[in-house]
Image (cartoon, coloured by chain):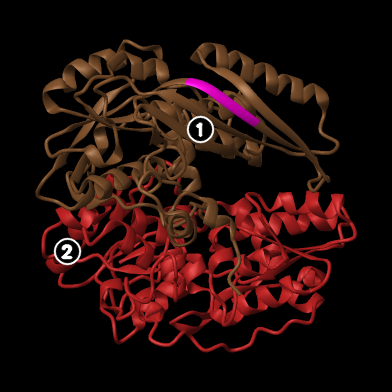
């Protein structure tokens, strides 16, 4: 399983499935941040966008994800102030330049993204900026992999582990893994090499009768990933946030897999500031995103894929996000 | 009630649908219905129009004025026409700096001279200020003359034709994104904005069947439109497609595919196979064509556009459904 959405895109774009042995099947995992954000959180973001004076700021493709009845993109066309930012620090400039507005950042992403948002919160506190807040929908990768490893309806033999997340959390964060895992870079050759390494590790397992004698995780992406990750980024992250149970689209509640504000930073919590509650929303009828996200189905096995659900008219988030498995398979085909 | 979203203007499928469902269905006529960059009228005249709303109006490699001349000159050139006369209309928000207007006009004049065309008529409107920084928008139209014996159209590609690309892709789109969003990329990221009539003049012949300048939607969109209009399959080789290393690095960082990123000074040509080497040599002899390459061919056995990837796999190269957005992580 390739965990990361950027790997899914690279695999599809380079046609890697088309050159692999028939004995190797790649399945796409839960590593697309937009895709695993449950519909209730999208609805909460949309609700926030309708509050007077609120400016919604977000990264890229989040604005297209359909909530129960609308999307941020549609709200924008209808007059809501929704802005795409490329750095969360842009939000602080907006907050300073437009003191009459409330700048709300929709915080979606994994450990690659969340430390920069935590850093922004620290900066806002230092600069006494009071009109900036964050809807924290951040997620943590290791608990999700643990849940997938233990799930009964899927059998994964090895993980191609995310390169960028691992630069932050380090190889040691995966020490719970009982199957081979390789942290890979994003070029075609990186991914092919990682697959080769996983196959070698599986052979090693077979020869040793299943006993693992060393740390199962290997690093292919050595130019940037260390065993300990990036301690400075982790320190900033856990200064502002703490782990909490979190709902993943399709997978459900995973213990300790989300991030919530620590008490001393609660004033930056947008849900609290605007008294918005994340409700349980029903997934769109027939949408298989949930099963696709944990690798139980491939996009081609979803009855809506390419028919009712296309990038022009996406039903589920895996078709919206450019990193989503459905979007990658739709765009680049089965190879 | 459905409303216009920004993605309706992005050159992808959503934009195509609006053109098809609203404009073509209302305005339908045999000249309009050919999906080329210019219309062919009165036997040998090419006629076209284009609007420019680029933000920021000054960017590395050009400005809105230069772009507005090049855009229309290129649309005419892609019909094989020699561009002759341009009109220009300005929509300017109140508060716009007159010094800037002068700079833009100077850059248009310079480009007009380079391309050997004349701006012969124009219009100016000033509107209420709507943006924090006052904006301006330009529309140019142009006519040109198609030489005798030249018949160039998106629908003319034939099986076996070679495909020539005149240089590196994605330069314009990435330069604009970098300038607009202040990413702070330090590499040499410059728009390729340029008039292409000079380069077309170097190799135009009856053996040139299709010319397109892959602007919005990138090379992928142009190739798909040609495949559909001509009813041929297309296979291109990823390794042959020139991309500057700094542009590739920026695309990788942002999660963008250069095949879908806009160009403003490149052309793609379908030429008869026997003419390909000679045509390539001619394109390369022009200063804008130094990095030109034969990137693929039109084929019978496939339908649609395919790319042979670096690892040797063949995969479809579709049109972008909507504007590309940078990824989250």
Question: Quarter of the image containing the N terminus of chain A?
Answer: bottom left
> Is residue B95 visible in the rendered structure shown here?
yes
Of A104 and B106, which appears nearest the observer?
B106
Of B255 and B216, which appears nearest the observer?
B216
In the image, residue B260 above or below residue A299 = above
User: Which color was chain B given?
Assistant: brown
Separation of disc 2 and disc 1 at Cα? 40 Å
A310 left or right of A204 in image: right
Name the spot of residue A275 as percent of width and height, x first.
79, 82
Question: Quarter of the image containing the C terminus of chain A?
Answer: bottom left
User: Which color was chain A given?
Assistant: red
What residue would you read off at disc 2?
A24
B86 falls in the magenta region: yes
Magenta residues? B84-88
What residue would you read off at disc 1?
B172
What's the residue at 29%, 51% (across, down)? A191
Label 2 environment density (alpha carbons within 10 Å; few <14, some 14–19, many ≥20): few
Residue B55 occupies quadrant = top right
Answer yes or no: do the residues labelled 2 and 1 have beta carbons within 8 Å?
no
Residue A63 occupies quadrant = bottom right
A54 falls in the magenta region: no
Q: Residue furthest front?
A: B42
> Is residue A262 visible in the rendered structure shown here?
no
Name the spot of residue B26 as percent of width and height, x first.
48, 59
Same subunit: marks 2 and 1 = no
């Amino acid at each position: 399983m390739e965990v990361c959405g950027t790997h899914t895109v690279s695999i599809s774009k380079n046609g890697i499935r088309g050159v692999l042995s028939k004995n190797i099947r790649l399945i796409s995992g839960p590593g697309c941040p937009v895709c695993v954000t449950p519909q209730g959180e999208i609805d909460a973001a949309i609700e926030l966008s309708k509050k007077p004076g609120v400016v919604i700021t977000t990264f890229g493709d989040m604005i297209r994800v359909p909530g129960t009845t609308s999307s941020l993109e549609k709200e924008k066309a209808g007059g809501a102030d929704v802005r795409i930012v490329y750095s969360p620090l842009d939000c602080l400039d907006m907050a300073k330049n437009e003191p009459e507005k409330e700048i709300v950042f929709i915080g979606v992403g994994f450990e690659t993204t969340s430390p920069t948002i935590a850093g922004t919160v620290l900066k806002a506190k230092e600069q006494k900026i009071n009109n900036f807040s964050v809807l924290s929908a951040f997620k943590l990768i290791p608990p999700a992999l643990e849940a997938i490893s233990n799930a009964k309806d899927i059998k994964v033999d090895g993980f191609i582990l995310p390169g960028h997340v691992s630069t932050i959390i380090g190889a040691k964060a995966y020490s719970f893994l009982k199957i081979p895992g390789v942290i890979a870079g994003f070029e075609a050759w990186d991914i092919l090499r990682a697959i080769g390494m996983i196959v070698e590790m599986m052979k090693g397992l077979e020869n040793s009768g299943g006993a693992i004698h060393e740390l199962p995780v290997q690093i292919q992406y050595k130019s940037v990933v260390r065993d300990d990750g990036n301690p400075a980024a982790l320190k900033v992250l856990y200064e502002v946030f703490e782990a909490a149970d979190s709902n993943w689209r399709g997978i459900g509640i995973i213990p300790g897999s989300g991030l919530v504000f620590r008490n001393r930073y609660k004033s930056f919590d947008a849900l609290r500031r605007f008294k918005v509650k994340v409700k349980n929303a029903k997934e769109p009828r027939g949408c298989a995103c949930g099963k696709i996200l944990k690798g139980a189905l491939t996009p081609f096995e979803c009855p809506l894929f390419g028919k009712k659900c296309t990038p022009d008219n996406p039903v589920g988030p895996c078709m919206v996000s450019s990193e989503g498995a459905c979007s990658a398979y739709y765009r680049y085909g089965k190879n | 009630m459905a409303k216009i979203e920004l993605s309706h203007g992005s050159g992808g499928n959503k934009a195509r649908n609006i053109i098809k469902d609203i404009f073509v269905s209302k305005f339908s006529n045999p000249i309009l219905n050919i999906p080329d960059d210019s219309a062919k009228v009165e036997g040998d005249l090419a006629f076209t129009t284009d609007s420019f709303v680029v933000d920021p109006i000054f960017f590395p490699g050009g400005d809105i004025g230069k772009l507005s001349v090049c855009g229309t000159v290129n649309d005419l050139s892609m019909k094989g026409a020699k561009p002759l006369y341009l009109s220009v209309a300005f929509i300017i928000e109140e508060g716009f700096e007159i010094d800037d207007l002068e700079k833009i006009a100077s850059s248009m004049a310079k480009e007009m001279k380079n391309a050997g065309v004349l701006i012969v008529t124009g219009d100016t409107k000033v509107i209420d200020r709507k943006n924090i920084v006052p904006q301006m928008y330009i529309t140019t139209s142009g006519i040109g003359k198609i030489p005798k014996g030249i018949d160039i159209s998106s629908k003319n590609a034939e099986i076996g034709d070679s495909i020539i690309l005149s240089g590196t892709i994605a330069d314009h789109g990435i330069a604009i994104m970098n300038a607009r969003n202040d990413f702070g990329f330090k590499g040499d990221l410059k728009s390729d904005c340029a008039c292409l009539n000079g380069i077309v003049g170097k190799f135009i012949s009856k053996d040139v069947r299709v010319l397109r300048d892959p602007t919005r939607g990138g090379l992928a969109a142009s190739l798909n439109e040609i495949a559909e209009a001509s009813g041929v399959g297309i296979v291109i080789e990823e390794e042959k497609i020139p991309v500057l290393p700094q542009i590739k690095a920026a695309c990788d960082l942002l999660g963008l595919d250069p095949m879908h990123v806009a160009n403003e000074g490149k052309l793609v040509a379908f030429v008869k196979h026997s003419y390909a080497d000679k045509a390539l040599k001619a394109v390369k002899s022009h200063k804008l064509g130094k990095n030109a390459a034969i990137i693929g061919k039109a084929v019978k056995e496939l339908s649609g556009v395919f790319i042979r990837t670096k690892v040797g796999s063949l995969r479809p190269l579709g049109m972008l459904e909507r504007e590309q957005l940078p990824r989250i992580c």
